[in-house]
Every structure is written in structure tokens, then in C-alpha cells.
Amino acid sequence: MQRMHGWVGRKDRHAVAIEAVVHWDDGRTRSVKLSNFSKEGCRIESDIDFRIGERLEIDVPRFGQVKAQVRWAFAGSAGAKFLAGSEVEQR
């Protein structure tokens, strides 16, 4: 397989419908829906305006809180990459 310029490979993500809670350092929390998930990251569905680069913790049922960073954001959704040392990486 030949890569196209600008293409970034990633692990396959699996379609899910998981209710989760996002936590920010300033103490805010918000309920969200995760619509796809892998060991490396997830897609967050919400009316929240996430900022690219912001760090947060996502409380995921059966995994606990995982540290993540927003990699992309659009109205209604955002993509988050799990950070090193997160519980998801270790499972």
C-alpha cells in the first residue's frame, strides 16, 4: 500500500454508542456520547465546542477515566487521542 501525502494512518475504530463523561481541569464535567472507539482514541458526539489541542479526561464505563487530547473538532463532534499511560492503552 502506498501512502498519499498528508495521510496519517491510525488503528481501526469500532462503532459504539457509549455514554461517557468529560472532565476538564477547571472542574467542569459534561455528559457525552462516544460513537467510535479504539485503543488510541475516540469520536465524541456533543453540543460542546471542543478546542483542538485541549486536554481532558473521559470517564468511560468499564475503563475508568482516560486522559485524552482533542485532535480535531467540528460542530457536534470531536476526535480525541488517548495520551500515554491511559488505561485503554494498557488493556
Image: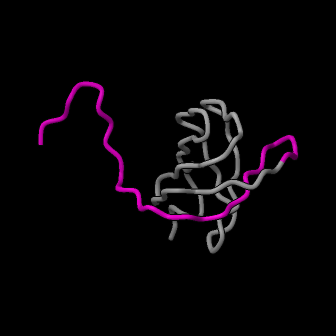
Q: Position of residue 88 (x, y in %)?
A: 54, 63
Q: Quadrant of residue 74?
A: top right
How was the colour assigned to the protein in this rendering? one colour
Up the image or down, 11 lies above or below 26; here it is below
Q: Quadrant of residue 85?
A: bottom right
Q: Is residue 6 magenta?
A: yes
Residue at 33% from the left image edge and 36% from the top image edge: 8
Q: Position of residue 18 (x, y in %)?
A: 60, 65
User: In this rendering, would 12 be left or right of 63?
Assistant: left
Q: Quadrant of residue 70?
A: top right
Residue at 60% from the left image edge and 33% from the top image edge: 75
Pick the residue in front: 14 or 75: 75
Q: Position of residue 66 (x, y in %)?
A: 64, 57
Pick the residue in front: 14 or 17: 17
Outermost residue to the left? 1
Up the image or down, 60 lies above or below 29; here it is below
Residue at 20% from the left image edge and 29% from the top image edge: 4
Residue at 78% from the left image edge and 51% from the top image edge: 30
User: In this rendering, would 75 be left or right of 14?
Assistant: right
Outermost residue to the bottom? 62
In this picture, which residue range is highlighted in magenta? 1-28
Pick the residue in front: 31 or 12: 31
Outermost residue to the top? 5
Viewport quadrant of the N terminus: top left
Q: Is residue 26 magenta?
A: yes
- Does the magenta stretch mainly form a helix, a strand or a loop? loop
